Image (spheres, rainbow, N blue to C red):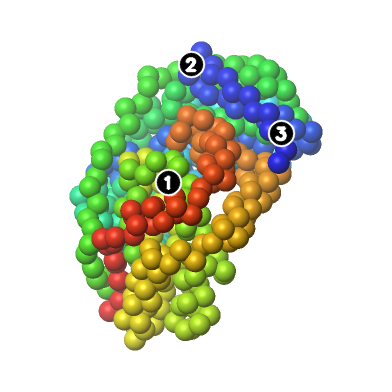
Amino acid sequence: MRKMKIDRTVLQNGLRVITIERDSEVFSMGVGIKAGSLYEGRQNNGISHLIEHMLFKGTAKRTVEQLNDDVEKLAGDLDIYTTYIDTVMTVSILKDRAQDCLELVSDMLQNATFPNKELTLEKKVIIEEIKMAKDDAEDVAYLGLYKAAFPDEWHKFNIAGTTNSVKSIKVKDLEEFYKAYYIPRNAVVCIVSSFTHQEIVSLMEKYFGMWQGEKAQLNLRQSPMVKNKNVKGYKKGLGQTHVIYGFDINGLTREEDAALSIINKKLGAGANSILFKELREKKGLAYSIYSDMDYMENIRLFYIYAGISGENLKSTLKIIDEVLEKFKNDDSLIDEKSLKLLKDIFITDVVIAEETPADMIDYLLDGELTYNDPMEYRNMLEKIERVTKEDIKRVVNKIFKDPIVYILNPK
């Protein structure tokens, strides 16, 4: 693996600036703000996502038309998306437009105005987005799992909000949330470019140095997860039954997380995984079958998803349960040879990502925002390389018990 020089500076206002200097004609930037649905309440559910949309609707110095024109003049890609835990802006442009980009982004993050006319229009757009999401059965099933697992706080997993919550949000609500969360101490900027770190820091001080605000009060509660329960849901117009197993992985150490990453890769991540082979290739029961993990501050979940025909439900549940039991009891599923190969796959993934600025920015932002360490992805890779068969067996037996199972059936 290549030596990776990552520089990090915290400006006087608390804004964290992380850079990688690389010979390139492209200037790639990511800005992460800790403002996502996990920090919302029922009344303002969807406000982080709504602000994401409204950032393009004008600032104190730019009308919506001027803002859109200036974005286009960058002649590159500028995108914003919202997750459970953050709002992320990514930019890829030619390096000679870097200063124009920084000035524009700083204006959007510091001086958004939320015109009421634009808010009314954008609410309609988001309500259509919510309706569209309801047509995606996999998304509906996924939200159903979280509703069942965390009944008191399920809204936190509904990034776009509900039709009613979005309709109820006023300009004042946007202004208050923006003022509370869009502050330098709650933000990270990562840049991969040919500029030196000091050059970037000087530019950041020029365009972001006046950005002010008190530290955000991040409202996160530790939510106990409902376990050992089967929950059924129904939806009209479905062509399949959708099954999701959820396992609580709160409390795992980072070393155990590393072992779980290997377990996930073998169990359900990819065409060579055990669940894929058993359910799709051997039995033909599912087209889509996979496992994955959600790491979200105080809520962490390992899940298994399968989309199947209703008549195959019992067979599918039986096979998943058998595979999980086999994982607990059969040490040959991951022998030393396959363990080495799985580790090599992770190394390959990281090496490839480090060649891609956008992927690197994702790694850096996630590490800094979640673990206060932009190099956390490398730290995790080192932990993965140290995982033993004994570690895997211990983690398998620790987490694969008392699942909550959500089953979404056609109505």
| Near-viewer residue (188 or 91) | 188
Q: Residue at x 55, y 65 (%)?
A: 270
Task: Please rate how many residues cluster around mark 3, counting C-alpha atoms within 10 Å: few if below 14, some from 14 to 19, many from 20.
Answer: few
Residue 77, disc: none
Q: Is residue 146 visible?
A: yes
Q: CA distance from mark 3 to mark 2?
A: 31 Å
Mark 3 or mark 2: which is in front? 3
Judging by the rendered image, the residue that carries numbered circle 3 is 3
Task: Please rate how many residues cluster around mark 1, counting C-alpha atoms within 10 Å: few if below 14, some from 14 to 19, many from 20.
Answer: many
| Near-viewer residue (388 or 349) | 388
Q: CA distance from mark 3 to mark 1?
A: 26 Å
Mark 1 or mark 2: which is in front? 1
| Near-viewer residue (293 or 32) | 293
Q: Residue at x 36, y 73 (%)?
A: 322
Judging by the rendered image, the residue that carries numbered circle 2 is 13
Query: Is 411 located above or below residue 83 in the figure?
Result: below
Mark toward the start of the polypeptide (1 vs 2): 2
Q: Amino acid at mark 1?
A: Glu
Q: Are marks 3 and 1 in contact (CB under 8 Å)?
A: no
Q: Is residue 301 visible?
A: no
Q: Are marks 1 and 2 in contact (CB under 8 Å)?
A: no
Residue 256, disc: 1
Position in image of residue 80 (x %, y %): 53, 43
Q: Residue at x 78, y 36 (%)?
A: 24
Mark toward the start of the polypeptide (3 vs 2): 3
Query: Is 343 located above or below residue 209 in the figure?
Result: below
Residue 27, image quadrant: top right
